[in-house]
Amino acid sequence: MPRRWIAALACLAALVALACEGDGSATPRPTGSAPSGGPGGIAALGDSISTGFASCLVLTSCERNSWSTGDGLRVRSHYRRLLDQDPEIRGRAYNHARPGARADALEGQAKAAVRDRADYVTVLIGANDVCRGGVDAMTPVAEFRADVDRGLRALRTGRPKARVLVVSIPDLYRLWEVGHGDSRAVRAWRRGVCPALLANATSTAPADRTRRSAVRDRIDAYNDELVKACRAYGSRCRHDGGAVHGVRFTLDMLNPLDWFHPNVSGQGRLAEVTWRSSGLAD
């Protein structure tokens, strides 16, 4: 494929995944349909990270590699681990996460998980609330919390006995730290990947350093609210204790197209650290 086509496709997909106004209202795309009876299975809520975006070396969702609901063999997802424990959940993995989704999409995604009768729901949201534009466009912290609360309320109302895992937002600042010296990553980021953080990635100007610090602080504030929201939910909600935020991502855990989303190795690492926090491990 000509280089200019690759660049154009990468630009378009990165903008869709990281800056679009996703509202979570798209038709659900489950791994399987919900048959009557039996355990309710697992549902994933959130954004492009939980869809396995770009993990198949194409800038689109690749749900088979999702750390949460993936059914592929290359990632030992939560769904595959649960399937080892209970073969009856086969085909009951539902991925309602959407590229570009922000916290205000959670309520609609949660209602879809309720319709699926999911017994276990993972929630990973917040990157697009930071990345959708410049610093001024970041979702205010109070609004983020209100959006998360509405989503969790829909789950608690519709599936009060379901287990919920709320996952911390990855340390995106860490990605800048390890990637801003790599020319491949910098070129990809110039196509519109998380501009609030990654624009002018090599600049040391005070304004750019201040902007990056503001993004880091906003992610920390969101993560604090996710802890509180899960606590307010009650005993059926578990937080990952900052496990995902604490992952020390390296460039070999990112896809080589946008140098932002986890590749198969990165998705596998997310599955591993979040499974430890889920309370469902053997």
Image: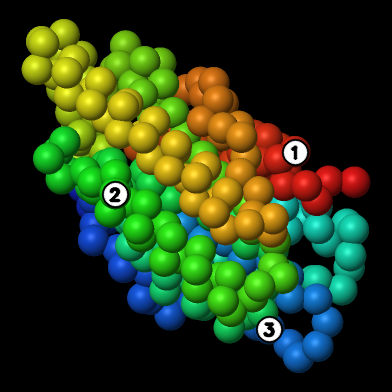
Closer to the chain start, of discs 2 and 3, is 3
Give the farthest residue toward the bottom: 36
Q: Report whether 162 appears left or right of 202.
A: right
Numbered label attached to residue 34: 3
The amino acid pointed to by label 3 is Ala
Structure colour scheme? rainbow
Residue 15 horizontal/vertical position (percent)? 24, 50
Query: On the rendered structure, is 227 left or right of 134?
Result: right
x and y percent of residue 2 in the render?
26, 43
Q: Quick check: can you spot residue 188?
A: no
Q: Nearer the viewer, residue 268 or 172?
A: 172
Determine the residue positioned at 83% across, 82% down.
38
- Above or below, comparing residue 178 to residue 24 in the picture: above
Residue occupied by mark 2:
142
Q: In what element is the residue under mark 3?
A: loop
- Residue that label 1 marks: 276
Could you tell me residue 20's position as x and y percent?
24, 57
Marks 3 and 1 in Cβ contact (< 8 Å): no
